[in-house]
Amino acid sequence: MEITWVQFAVVCPLVMLAGFVDAVAGGGGLISLPAYMLAGLPVHISIATNKLSSCMGTVVATARYARSGYVKARLSVLCAVCSLAGSVIGSNLSLLLSERTFKIAMLFILPLAAFYVLRSKDLDRVRTPFSERRTALLAAIIALAVGCYDGFYGPGTGTFLLLLLTGCAHMTLRDAAGTTKVINLASNVAALTVFLLNNQVLLPLGLTAGLFSIAGNSLGAAMFIGRGAKCVKPLMLTVLAVFFARLVYELFFEA
């Protein structure tokens, strides 16, 4: 497929913005995937090429979080494995269940998530920590469930992981952010491998956009490390609002 300079001009800046948002609060796919479609690429090629640029950016963000001590190796590996298993389950479920039915369910879930964020005075407040074993068990269950969601539908995965890891597993925001990056990276790499084997990835566009994603993720990770929850809450609410609006459009207005 021939790629034009206009497609590069449309995709790359939006992918950089997506990388920034993704590194801070998750949900960057709500920006990057539509960018590829806006550039006129077919749906499957858009999804596949977006995985390449997203992987490149997520690698950098994950490495930066790891260097800053936000990634706990044993816990992250466990969660990554569970996420991969969940993604396989979700992919198979998507073949059995109506996507419209799932989207309708999300219309009820998203306002609850937004209410939780608004209700929380401080996402980074100190919670009574659980034992290491209980935290690992809860985080693994969350990774499995959200991995299933990611395999079935996908957008907003990082945001849901941050909410659940902090709210249910009582992880600190920083530990949750590092674990989220590892889970996302594992899921993205697995999906990208499948797309590459099926020749669905536009390598020139994906690699170029990936450089912009790296820049956006680097800036976002730096802001998160420097400011913590102060920048997460407004971005998280924005991501949830955009996701909700997109679902409403897809369900009721898209032809």
Image: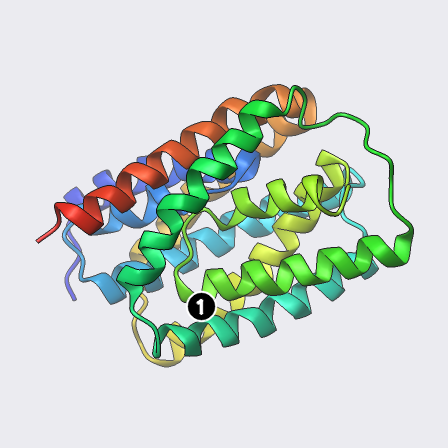
Residue 219 at what x, y percent from top left?
A: 54, 30
Q: Badge 1 local density, few (<14 within 10 Å), some, or many (20+)?
A: many
Look at 63% across and 28% down and name the residue there: 224
Nearest the viewer among 9 and 75 is 75
Residue 124 at what x, y percent from top left?
A: 72, 27
Nearest the viewer among 224 and 87 is 87
Q: Is residue 141 visible?
A: yes
* Quarter occupied by the C terminus: bottom left
Q: Residue furthest left?
A: 255
Element at badge 1?
Answer: helix
Asked if residue 201 lies left or right of residue 253, the reply is right
Asked if residue 157 lies left or right of residue 130, the reply is left
Look at 52% across and 69% down and name the residue there: 87
Nearest the viewer among 19 and 28 is 28
Nearest the viewer among 111 and 142 is 111
Residue 39, placed above or below residue 42: above
Disc 1 residue type (three-letter): Leu
Residue 153 at what x, y percent from top left?
A: 39, 60
Q: Which residue was labeled with disc 1?
A: 192
